[in-house]
Amino acid sequence: MMKNRFYLLSFFTFISFQSYACSCGGPPTFCEYLNKSWVESDLIVKGKKIRNIDHGFEFQISKIYGGEETKKTIIVWGDQGWLCRYYNGRFIDGEEYYLALIRLFEDTENTWAQSNPIGDLEKEGDYTISFCGKSYWHHSDEELIGETKTQVDACLKEINPDCEVAATFEIEIDFCDIETSEPFPNPTSDKFYVEIPDTINLSRGTARIFDDCGKLVRQHEDLAEFYSSGICYLRLDGLADGFYFLDINLPELCESHFTRRIIKK
């Protein structure tokens, strides 16, 4: 009898803990969430939900307002019943959303952190959306809670006025069927190098450099001018310190792009 009472007490304690942990309140609108939330967002984006994947969904980014991401399509994981996240059924395939996301990583010091990947499907670098406040916006919110798209765009403009740009870059795993290298040195104060095999014809190769908002800041139409003996060398002179993205395109050889992040400091 005592043992049964102990199990019963443990069960209700667990349920009470989960209810308390997930009933964290938070700002009731997306604009307030962006400005007042105690859950710091790693990535603020606009885009469309593509499809469900188990307890998460694929999301295609069209604009980045805060944070850094090189992939056009990301995975956002929802709730399984006890994770303090929104369920993925709340998000409609093909619909546009604004999301304030938390990037998943293994927090060994805090095993209950929202950032920790759960299960075999979730991976470091994927995202989750917090239940602590209104961490997303959808056009239905105009009627439900009176928050308009114009208001949301204005809030985002206040938070980061320079980063309302299209996300146009994506890291490719396979570039022209060759194993690509990383730019070096990285970080760099000015010049950096990329190894490209001598067998690759760069007669029509182009290189573009984007800042951390995705804005094009430098473009080289003839990559052959910067190439010698398997090494392509480019410069960041005249650009402010910070994060940049290098995009190399060889249209005569393949459809994929070589895109990597570079740090100038």
Image: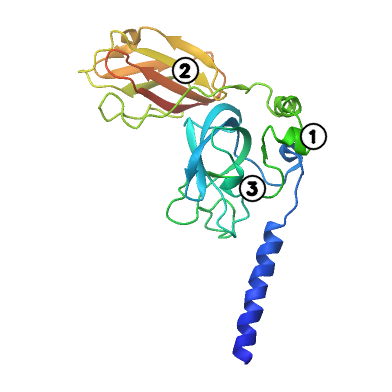
Residue type at the position of mark 2: Ile
Q: CA distance from mark 3 to mark 2?
A: 33 Å
Where residue 49 appears, x then y in whole percent? 54, 36
Q: CA distance from mark 2 to mark 1?
A: 40 Å
Horizontal arrangement in the rendering, residue 143 relative to residue 203 (left or right): right
In this view, 252 is above or below 4: above
Q: Of the two numbered discs 3 and 2 on the same chain, state the one appearing first in sequence.
A: 3
Quickly name the residue at label 2.
209
In this view, 214 is above or below 102: above
- 49 or 27, which lies in front? 49
- Residue 117, numbered circle: none
Quickly name the residue at label 3.
130
Q: Of the two numbered discs 2 and 1 on the same chain, state the one appearing first in sequence.
A: 1
Residue visible at 30% across and 28% down?
180
Give neighbour class at mark 3: few <14, some 14-19, many 20+ (Cα, 10 Å): many
Farthest residue to the right: give it.
Answer: 146
Give neighbour class at mark 2: few <14, some 14-19, many 20+ (Cα, 10 Å): many
In this view, 4 is above or below 34: below
Q: Residue 164, located in which quarter of the rendered image?
A: top right
Label 1 with label 3: CB-CB less than 8 Å: no
Residue visible at 76% across and 34% down?
143
Quickly name the residue at label 1.
146
Residue visible at 43% across and 51% down?
121
- 130 or 48, which lies in front? 48
Q: Secondary structure at mark 2?
A: strand
The answer to whether one can see residue 141 in this image is yes
